């Protein structure tokens, strides 16, 4: 999981802002604490989607195999 500390979240935000300035039309955050994802989402002007990144992003993505429970070894916590 990335963005667990404030410093990690700041680094990810700087990278996300660089991607936005380079012309990215959206950003996907995966496996990130809700607070970090919220901070990044609020700082950007492009849509931010999340997979296991909390409910404060602009939209959620769920992988079909996670949603259907097609893994024997584990069950996704965020489905």
Image (cartoon, rainbow, N blue to C red):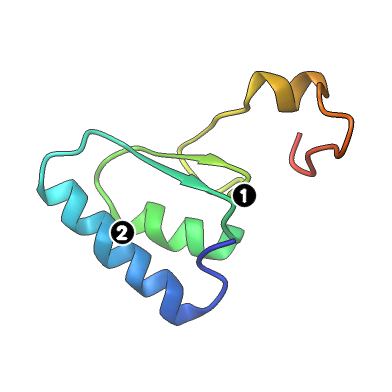
Q: Is residue 69 above or below residue 37?
A: above
First along the sequence among labels 2 and 1? 2
Instruction: Identify which residue, 24 or 34, lies in the foreground.
Output: 24
**Element type where label 2 sits in the image:** helix
x and y percentages locating residue 30 in the rendered image: 53, 47
Looking at the rendered image, the quarter that the N terminus falls into is bottom right
Q: Residue at x 59, y 58 (%)?
A: 34
| Left or right: 17 in relation to 69 | left
Q: How many marks?
A: 2
Whether residues under marks 2 and 1 lie with C-beta atoms below 8 angstroms apart, the answer is no
Q: Is residue 60 above or below residue 22?
A: above
Give the alpha-carbon distance from disc 2 to disc 1, as whole Å.
16 Å
Q: Hey, which quadrant is residue 13 in on the image?
A: bottom left
Q: Which mark, by number, is residue 38?
A: none
Q: Hey, which quadrant is residue 68 in on the image?
A: top right
x and y percentages locating residue 63 in the rendered image: 63, 25
Graded by Cα atoms within 10 Å as few (under 14), some (14 to 19) or many (20 or more), the crowding at tag 1 reads many
Q: Residue furthest right?
A: 72
Q: Residue at x 46, y 47 (%)?
A: 29
**Element type where label 1 sits in the image:** loop
Q: Which residue has dot 2 on it?
A: 43
Q: Residue furthest front?
A: 73
Q: Is residue 52 above or below residue 11?
A: above
Q: Residue furthest left?
A: 22
Q: Which residue has dot 1 on it?
A: 54
């Amino acid at each position: 999981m990335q963005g667990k500390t404030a410093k990690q979240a700041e680094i990810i935000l700087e990278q996300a802002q660089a991607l936005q300035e380079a012309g990215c039309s959206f950003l996907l955050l995966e496996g990130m604490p809700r607070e970090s994802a919220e901070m990044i989402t609020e700082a950007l002007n492009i849509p931010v989607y999340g997979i296991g990144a909390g409910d404060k992003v602009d939209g959620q993505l769920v992988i079909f195999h996670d949603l259907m429970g097609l893994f024997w070894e584990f069950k996704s916590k965020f489905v």
